[in-house]
Amino acid sequence: MPVEFGPDEFKTNERRTIVTRFWIFLFLLVPILGVGVFLWAPYAGVYLPQDVSTHGHKIDHLFTFILLLTGAVFIATEVVLVVFMWRYDRERNQDPVKFTHGSHNLEMVWTIIPAATLLFIAIYQMNAWAEVKIDRPDIPPTLKVTARQFEWRLQYPGPDGVLDTRDDIHTVNDLHIPVNEQILIHLESDDVLHSFFLPNLRIKQDAVPGSTIPVWFRATEIGAFDLVCAELCGWGHYKMKGRLTIESREDFENWLEQKRQEQEAVQ
Amino acid sequence: MATAGHAHSDSFQYQPALPIPNGKLCMWLFLSTEIMFFAALIGTYIVIRFGAPVWPFSHEVHLSEPIGAFNTFVLICSSVSVVLALEASRANRAGAAKGWIATTLALGVLFLGVKAYEYNAKFGHGIYPALPRSRMYEKPDLYFASAVRQRIQALRAEINAKGAENLTEQDQQRLQLLDEIAADPALGPDPTRASLTALALRIMPLGTAPGEEESHHAGLNDEHPWLKLPIVVPGGNMWASTYFTLTGFHALHVLGGLVVFALLLFMRLDAGKANFIENIGLYWHFVDIVWIFLFPLLYLF
Amino acid sequence: MSANASGETVVDPHAAEHGIGKYIAVFVALIVLTGASFFTYSSLWPFHDEPAVGRLFMMAVSCTKATLVMLFFMHLKWEANWKYVLTVPPAIMAIFIMLALVPDIGLRYRIASPKRRAFMAEPLDVASVEAGSHAADNGDQQHETGGEH
Amino acid sequence: MSATIAHGHEGAHGDAHAHSGSFLTTYVFSRDHKVIGIQFLISTLLWFVVGGLLALAVRWQLAWPWADMPIVGRMLFSAEGGQISPEFYTMLFTMHASVMIFFVIIPILAGAFGNFLIPLMIGAEDMAFPTLNMLSYWAMWPAFILMTASFFVEGGAASAGWTAYTPLASVHQAAPASGTGQTLWLLGLIFVGISSMMGSVNYMTTIIQMRAPGMTMFRLPLTIWAMFITAVLQAFALPVLTAALFMQVLDRVLGTGFFVPEGLMINNETAGAGGGQPLLWQHLFWFYSHPAVYIMILPAMGMVSDMIATFARKPIFGYKPMVYAIAGIAGLGFIVWGHHMFMSGMNPYLGMTFMLATMMIALPSAIKVFNWLGTIWGGKIELTTPMLFSLAFVSMFIIGGLSGIFMAATPVDLFIHDTYFIVGHIHYVLFGSSAFAIFGGIYYWYPKMFGRMMNETLGKIHFLLSFIFFNGTFFTMHILGAGGFPRRLADPYHYEAFKHMQPMNQFMTICALGMGAAQIIFAINFFGSLFFGKRVGRNPWRANSLEWQAPSPPGHGNFDFQPVVYRGPYEFNSPEVDEDYYPQTQPPPEKGGQEKQKEGEQH
């Protein structure tokens, strides 16, 4: 009894070679364009933004390290896929099919090597994580950030140097910090979840209502950057935008004093 | 071969698998999903309860351990009766099986009845979660005082709305009582912490911790049920949230079992129904086990 | 098939058929164990100062009761090994999810904000009220609740 | 040809069974697993259209924010002059994700393919509980109706993201749209959960108890293994979500305080009792929703394994490691949910634990990819449409899997969390992998479902356009994310730093439109082939597994003979036989003479 083939393509072999080559080329485009996009990205300015923190380079380094590692695996596997498609195409491959159910040794190899690599990455990154989220500096808070729909409320200690007293200085969406100093922020939320995201400082932390979450960093360069809300907080999420100004100690104190006087003038 | 398609059920054979009927396997798998369902609920209760700064003793929320224990007893009895129904059905004693199923049904209804009585007692004391907020306050603070004031005003307005000439003697007494409460120092211009606490205790005295001696003195809300003044139960909101959620979902499971038992009463429960009774029995025992954990967690801890 | 069904070691699933006496025994055991939970409330219970002991005791009693129900009423005692496959993984995961919730939810007041602390429940300070009421407010309060004092 | 394939005339056979009940019991309230599977397939494909249109609207806003939507804009938002309002934008991406995850990918894999394939592939005449199976489909309808209704209630549909993070989702005052719509959303998902629960216990029972004689667990096709493990995942993880959904409903409706801390005031109103913790929701939600990611990919992996072996004409490489990898993914999948919460304020030590487990879950995925490559090594590859989709699955899954490692590394996640990197990653896994496998699966099993072939040329055009436009849409998301581009912003260009990324977004939107248009070809092919497709015999692809030994389409009861299984499902090009395939039911050659064996005699 004749075997019933489905599609016509298998009965007639004309045009098939060209068509097959086309598909293989299409799959080859994946690694080529994939790598290409990542090579092009820094030139297009769509890549890790300028880093102005002391810990940021570790994160960037980890990112690059993982990118190179996964990039190598990506290129290798995609190329192997394309080569196999080329080599073992039905028309091209005149050898008999390799009738095998697998290889125990190969399985061991490609289990143990990735496992060791992954374990290495896991351990390699722990220090960076601890630096950002665990090893909290033992200093009084520089300021308190309270997120609410849809603004950032910032509260600096007044002349007494203590938060939550009458002489506190309040600003909205205007975050100033001194450069090259350890900053400790107490992050709170008044209503829903928000996320305190400073792309240039490689800082991200959700603000959770009911909790005070410490955030610490040290900025290394003077400049103005974005403060972004990175957790959906309602319809106005997109406009919950703040401005981060990193400035010298003097400028910072002048600004603080100016704010204090403005505040007193109102009261 | 060509005719095989017409009588599949008889002709199809399957690879030997677990030596139990499909229905029983399915029931056990269903019960493992139920384990996870109650694990989420009970786990939530445990972390919320033991993480809370203060949690009410059962007497503070008018929870009666003997009633809970009685309900435990009822469920254990119903577990025995359903297992006896299974035995009777396996022995092909359909009448006896139906009797035991009817007993189980009656015990289940009794359980739900007791549950309803308990719920009613809580509702009567104002212990329930409600939007935008219930009558329960976590601490005797100014919010509480203002809520009491508002309630008193609302009651006054309600009585006065009848018009001065229509007031009965009872209404007069009520107005008098409201005036007395309004004169409480806690509702005055500057209440102290102690006076606010005193007001809270006057409205609803808290129960006693286990092991302490019971002292029964009724609060305003108990003496005059129409008052329905706000109350203070520290930790009461989360207590009510978890208590009603846990017992509520358990009661729904009981109800589900009872529906099946009621349907069973219309069938002939001979040996042919034994597997079915075994499956519903498994479910019923599971519901029993959940209660075995809920009872100490909610009533005795 | 189940003529020799009295022994507990028989693995025959029908062994339970004539074991009504066994069910009664389990029933009695369950009642006694429920009573044992209540024992923590009696004045004879020696650990009133340490509630954790009583709670552990009650949980142990509950686990025993649940095991009895599963073994006898749910016939797990006479089932093959599939019973472990179906009951142990959910039990492990049930405990695991509870444990995983402890650091964030069980300890949620560890990093509570000042605002949260301000609204947080706290035990009623009954002692201060009693001290105050016996001194000054006694006369005022007597009218409503005096009969009880 | 073996006797098992030769006998039986499918046309006559089909007729013998088709008219046993009325139209209503045969096609609507059917208890036949194949009809239920096709019902699931059609329903979910319709929701696929809905979800896709929502996605296109999201893309429109990202490319040209506040621009009038052409044609449909005036109809939909006449109040805003044809613009998408920010409230509506939050609804769009919320409902896009909810629909795609809960109404498309999960039900199409578990509901449609699971239902159709499980009894056929294990050699059973139907599911263990046909009525329960029917109920699991009809339990989806309340969900469909509730979700549809939620678009039309006051305030609009759910808008707190598909993750429904509290308190935004659980407090009425938090968002104008988190009113009735959110409650309906929660109730809808509860029904989806009930449906999945009924389906999963049924699948497990069927696979354990109703395999044909000789079909041992390690002779099951990988599709079935994947379906089995998926069912286990659903059975154990879903109840936790159901409990959490109920708690959020209670928080919203009754005023319990599970997810609300003390003293929470939103828009000057008290937001409920208090005493709970917002992170509780995230833990319970991700306890299900992380395994759900595997629920959405494992059956696809199984189906792809079957297709790749068939079209490489070669046994699957490392069958048992593949099975163990599926089980490993499932096992680890339960203890990695916290990696969605690294930035959530979770205890950082807990985060470290979750990070270790998360790293390890990349391992079984890697093993699977290597085994697929091993399978096509030394084969004779036939580039049919299903095979193209399967190879695309492998190619795309490599990207999706590798990009996951970035998120698993907690310090890197610190930066890319909640950026478009995540969006790219999830779409490579869910669209590039799962949806491509679904398309492949439809092309592959369509002949079995309807007895006709889908058009190969149209199929290949569909593949070509989908593949190109898919990558055009989603690959660039990775570098957008590396640039810090946050997700869920109605107007990202509000920030100076992201303004120069708008042209890239426009390119992506154009690709997305192209991808949407490509699906029209698929729809034409799918529905056209019902009437004009070429009729096929039992085994058009010359595959081994049991479903291909049944008539196409199989009649009620599936098999017109008692299937007896002699070997695993991937014995292609076996030296034992002359043909390049070796059906599971074909007796070994030494018994070749006795073709008319009585069922179950020996194996």
Image (tube, coloured by chain):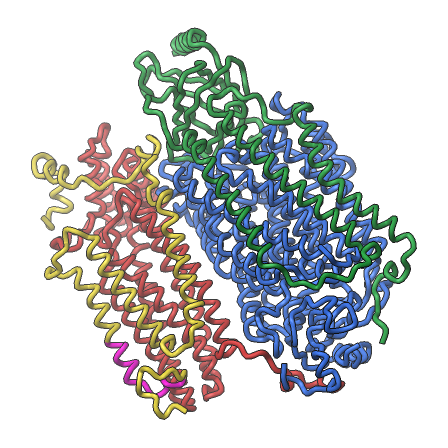
Chain colours: A green, B red, C yellow, D blue
Is residue D148 in the magenta section?
no
Give the answer, above or below, for where D38 lies relative to D374: below
Over which residues does the magenta segment extend? C14-28
Q: Position of residue B146 (x, y in %)?
A: 30, 35
- Asked if residue D443 shows in the view, the reply is yes
Which is more toward the observer, D254 or D388?
A: D388
Give the answer, above or below, for where D410 lies relative to D580: above
Quarter of the picture containing the N terminus of chain D is bottom right
In the image, farthest residue toward the left = C135
Describe residue A8's horizontal placement relative to residue C131 as left or right: right
Which is more toward the observer, C143 or D14?
A: D14
Is residue C15 in the magenta section?
yes
Describe residue A228's horizontal placement relative to residue D92 as left or right: left
Quadrant assignment, res B116? bottom left
Q: Position of residue D68 (x, y in %)?
A: 73, 31
Quadrant assignment, res B71? bottom left
Which is more toward the observer, A68 or D14?
A: A68
Q: Position of residue D301 (x, y in %)?
A: 63, 56
Quarter of the picture containing the C terminus of chain D is bottom right
**Residue at the (27%, 77%) spot, across then down:** C26
**Residue at the (17%, 64%) spot, across then down:** C39
**Residue at the (55%, 51%) spot, across then down:** A111
Q: Position of residue D153 (x, y in %)?
A: 60, 46
Which is more toward the observer, B167 or B256?
A: B256
Give the answer, above or below, for where B160 lies relative to A100: above
- Asked if residue D103 shows in the view, the reply is no
Quadrant assignment, res D17? bottom right
Describe residue D53's horizontal placement relative to residue A228 as left or right: right
